Amino acid sequence: MPYVLIQVTREGVTREQKAALIKGVTDLLAQVLNKNPTQTFVVIEEVDPDNWGIAGITVSKYRRSEQAVANHAVG
């Protein structure tokens, strides 16, 4: 019984995208490991960007700094 946890930042992942992830992971486990789809569990957990860190800062701050660099490069 596979259990797969997918964690993403809470930044607008749609229901359709989540459904595609669940189906894709389930299909992949069936194809590669011959796992029964009816016994495969996929959970998508959305994490607030202030609760996820990268490069020593929160994702929220990281995204803002990326945007500032992009805006500076364009302007």
Image: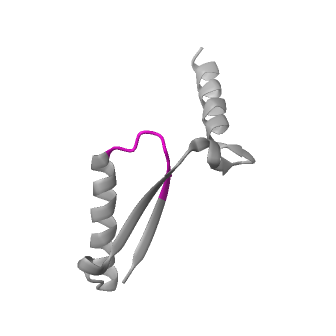
The answer to whether residue 69 is above or below residue 43 is above
Predominant secondary structure in magenta? loop
Nearest the viewer among 73 and 21 is 21
* Residue 24 placement (x, y as % from top left): 30, 64
Q: Residue at x 56, y 45 (%)?
A: 48
Q: Residue at x 30, y 71 (%)?
A: 26
Among all residues in the image, which is located at the extreme right? 56
Region of the chain picked out in magenta, as a range: 7-14
Nearest the viewer among 22 and 24 is 22
Verify whether residue 45 appears in magenta: no
The answer to whether residue 12 is above or below residue 15 is above
The answer to whether residue 71 is above or below residue 6 is above
Q: Quadrant of the N terminus?
A: bottom left
Q: Residue at x 40, y 64 (%)?
A: 43
Q: Tell me the quarter of the picture where residue 64 sits.
A: top right
Is 43 left, or right, of 54 in this rendering?
left
Is 33 left, or right, of 52 in this rendering?
left
Q: Residue at x 41, y 75 (%)?
A: 3
Among all residues in the image, which is located at the extreme top? 75
Verify whether residue 8 appears in magenta: yes
* Residue 38 placement (x, y as % from top left): 24, 78
* Residue 9 placement (x, y as % from top left): 51, 47
How are the colours assigned in the image? one colour
Nearest the viewer among 66 and 21 is 21
* Residue 16 placement (x, y as % from top left): 27, 48
Q: Tell me the quarter of the picture where residue 22 sits.
A: bottom left
Q: Quadrant of the C terminus?
A: top right
